[in-house]
Amino acid sequence: MKKIFPQPSLLFALLLFLSNCSLFEEEEVIPVDPVEIDETKGSEHLLLGNPSEAEAIEILANNYLSEKPQFALSYNDSRGIPNWVSWHLSSRWLGSTSRTDDFLPDFDLPFANNRIDRRDYSGSGFDRGHNCPSADRTSSRKDNAVTFLMSNVIPQAPEHNQKMWNEMEIFTRDQVRRNGNEVYVIMGNYGEGGEGRFGMEKRIGDDKQVAVPKYIWKVVVIIGEGDDDLSRIDERTRVIAVLTENLNRDVKEWHEYRVSVDAIEKETGLDLLSEVPEEIQAVIEAKVDNGPF
Ligand code: MN
Ligand code: MN
């Protein structure tokens, strides 16, 4: 009989090769209990304000406030990603826990029909980009696990995520680890259409539930370690704001993208640092940081 297929061993080798190919990178999903939230910690993350006046009421589906002990966020159900994530970083959040690396749906969110899970990003050409970084929450395994909730994730261009964003995250952590500071960080995004490994995409996921942001921004407020943080923010406080495009090429260093907080507020309609007294806000939001990095 004439052979239609190659040798079985060859066929096996081909299958083995294909299964290692990125086209077939679909990860096995292990069911895990939802991350338990420790209600005794938290609330420090909105000390400088709630930029969109998000609330935990279901009709505010596109500005839904979710406060975790580890960070606070405004979720946008029609985009399948957060509008912004806000967190306090001090030495007490930094320890030696390793990356749990287990991306999970956020079961705290009431939007069950449109719950985003890790597979919505698989094969998309975009990284699962943390807002609050895994490495900012290493004091306990649970704290770290919460950063892997998909509500803390956006589709981020790999070059953007792994280069400039990672470097800005390291710079920010070093402010705490080495320089005796504590910081408040807010990261957000807006617009639709970013560049992944396979080119421009507006939305990803089986049902295109996940918007790919066009712009990604971050604001970092740096103060010396101490108590009563809000009262220690004044006209001289260092505030670093960056506004970047979610692109996969020509990615420059993060500090090349510095803008004023006012510029981000103008683009997004948010009120950042709203708990800081108006006179001080006016000064620190108008400046563009030119400090060392
Ligand atoms: Mn990242
Ligand atoms: Mn403001």
Image (cartoon, grey):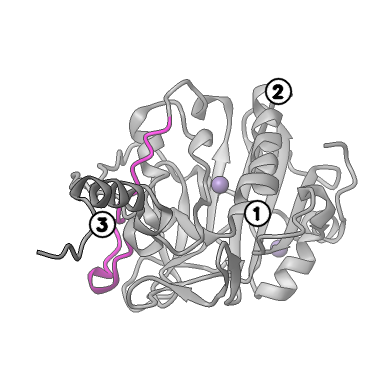
Residue 209 percent location from the top left of the image: 38, 75
Say if mark 1 contacts mark 3, CB within 8 Å: no
Q: Is residue 246 visible?
A: yes
- In this view of the protein, which residue sits in the foreground, 234 or 108? 108
The numbered mark, 1 or 3, whose residue comes first in the sequence reads: 3
Task: Identify which amino acid the numbered label 2 is placed on.
Answer: Gly
On residue 237, the disc is none
Q: Residues within 10 Å of mark 2 (few under 14, many from 20)?
A: some
On residue 180, the disc is 2
Residue indicated by mark 3: 107
Task: Identify which amino acid the numbered label 3 is placed on.
Answer: Phe
Residue 71 percent location from the top left of the image: 46, 47
Task: Tell me the quarter of the picture where residue 193 sits.
Answer: bottom right
Q: Is residue 101 left or right of residue 51?
A: left
Residue range corresponding to the magenta coloring: 99-117
Q: Is residue 273 visible?
A: no
Say if mark 1 contacts mark 2, CB within 8 Å: no
Q: Residues within 10 Å of mark 1 (few under 14, many from 20)?
A: many
- Residue at (65, 54) in percent of width and height: 160
The numbered mark, 3 or 2, whose residue comes first in the sequence reads: 3
Residue indicated by mark 1: 160
Task: Identify which amino acid the numbered label 1 is placed on.
Answer: His
Asked whether mark 2 and ligand 1 are closer than 8 Å, the reply comes as no
Distance from the alpha carbon under mark 1 to that under mark 3: 28 Å
Q: Secondary structure at mark 3?
A: loop
- In this view of the protein, which residue sits in the foreground, 204 or 100? 204
- Residue at (72, 62) in percent of width and height: 244
Task: Tell me the quarter of the picture where residue 277 sits.
Answer: bottom right
Q: Name the dominant secondary structure of the magenta segment.
A: loop
